[in-house]
Image (cartoon, coloured by chain):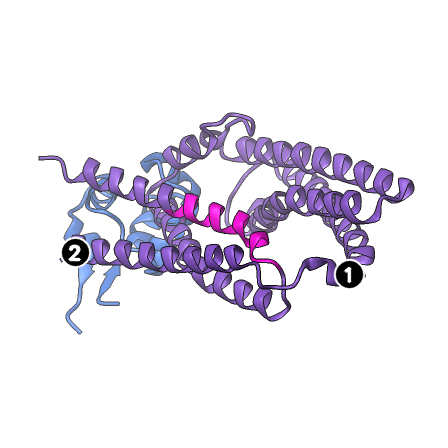
């Protein structure tokens, strides 16, 4: 997949568990886990929510790499 | 482009349904196929086997639910990675699917026994097993939903609420909705693959086509509802 993300990195920086992060942005732990593994690409709203929580930009969290 | 594809797919599905329905109706009208009574011997042992399978499924579901609730309670109802809930969630969902099978299976067994056996003891046995299996599985399902509600409070709904599925869907996040949508679409697209071989087996073993009428009606209703909701959602998201 050309889309890689740093969700796990930012989450660990904030010392949050997947459950805690899920509770904050109102999604399930499984969704966070799927995003971190790269199995699921979140919607724009969810990506913005994550970026806002990590106090950064969407481009910093999600990186599109040309194949 | 996507809309055109959906239209073509819908028309194709309707044509397929019409052809299959037409074949069934035509064969039924001809009445040329031998009667199911040629297979009377099957009806002696098949309903008893079905009844026993249902009892085993009920006991399995009950055991899984009791085991899961004890384990999950021990971990204070959390759903962290590698928690008891995380490990047992699939098993609990599988139990609910098995439970959904109990009613049609037990009632089929009861119906065959009443129609073809007429023995007082077997009918009584089947009636008791049907009633108890159905009651236990509904009770078990309600308990599973309550258990899931304790772990994930936003998914706390009542089983007997007729808007349960809608409320459940509303409470899901985007990935869960995507999974649910993909699963529904897969099931719908599998229906012709399940139904056509069933019909062919029926013809091969000379079962009367009327016995497939129920399945055809369910299939058609399911498809119509599916397309109705697809259209409704499409309208909702393409408002001008």
Quadrant including the N terminus of chain B: bottom left
Percent across and percent down for residue B14 are 32, 54
- Is residue A22 a member of the stretch shown in magenta? no
Nearest-to-viewer mark from 1 and 2: 1
- Residue A35's disc is none
Horizontal relation, residue B220 to residue B119: left or right:
left
Q: Seen from this angle, which residue lies furthest right? A: B121
Colour chain B appears in: purple
Q: Which residue is mark 2?
A: B4
Horizontal relation, residue B86 to residue B180: left or right:
right
Judge whether B163 appears above or below A1 on screen: above
Identify by letter the chain in blue: A
Magenta region: which residues? B208-223
Q: Secondary structure at mark 2?
A: helix
Question: Residue at left 41%, top 39%?
Answer: A20
Nearest the viewer among B210 and B47 is B210
Nearest the viewer among B124 and A58 is B124
Question: Residue at left 77%, top 50%?
Answer: B56
Question: Residue at left 35%, top 48%?
Answer: B175
In the rendered image, which quarter is residue A63 located in?
bottom left
Q: Which residue is mark 1?
A: B42
Percent across and percent down for residue B238 are 15, 40
Nearest the viewer among B71 and A17 is B71
Q: Tell me, yes or no, if residue B79 can be seen here.
A: yes
- Looking at marks 1 and 2 on the same chain, the residue that comes earlier in the sequence is marked by 2
- Chain containing the residue with disc 1: B
């Amino acid at each position: 997949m050309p889309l890689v993300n740093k969700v796990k990195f930012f989450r660990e920086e904030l010392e949050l568990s997947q459950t805690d992060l899920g509770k904050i942005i109102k999604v399930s732990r499984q969704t966070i886990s799927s995003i971190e593994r790269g199995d699921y690409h979140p919607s724009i709203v969810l990506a913005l929510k994550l970026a806002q929580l990590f106090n950064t930009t969407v481009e910093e969290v999600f990186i599109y790499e040309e194949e | 482009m996507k809309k055109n594809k959906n239209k073509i797919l819908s028309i194709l599905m309707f044509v397929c349904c019409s052809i299959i329905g037409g074949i069934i109706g035509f064969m039924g009208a001809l009445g040329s196929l031998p009667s199911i009574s040629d297979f009377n011997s099957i009806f002696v042992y098949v309903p008893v086997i079905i009844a026993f399978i249902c009892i085993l499924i009920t006991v399995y579901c009950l055991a899984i639910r009791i085991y899961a609730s004890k384990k999950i309670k021990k971990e204070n109802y959390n759903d962290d990675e590698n928690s008891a809930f995380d490990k047992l969630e699939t098993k609990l969902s599988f139990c609910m699917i098995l439970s959904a099978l109990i009613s049609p299976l037990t009632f089929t067994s009861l119906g065959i026994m009443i129609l073809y056996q007429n023995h007082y003891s077997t009918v009584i046995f089947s009636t008791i097993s049907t009633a108890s299996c159905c009651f236990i599985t509904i009770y078990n399902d309600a308990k599973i939903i309550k258990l899931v509600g304790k772990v994930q409070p936003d998914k706390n709904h009542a089983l007997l609420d007729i808007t349960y599925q809608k409320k459940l869907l509303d409470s899901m996040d985007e990935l869960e909705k995507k999974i649910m949508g993909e699963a529904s679409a897969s099931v719908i697209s599998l229906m012709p693959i399940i139904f056509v071989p069933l019909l062919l087996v029926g013809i091969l073993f000379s079962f009367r086509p009327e016995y497939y009428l129920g399945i055809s009606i369910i299939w058609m209703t399911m498809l119509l509802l599916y397309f109705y909701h697809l259209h409704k959602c499409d309208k909702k998201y393409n408002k001008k």
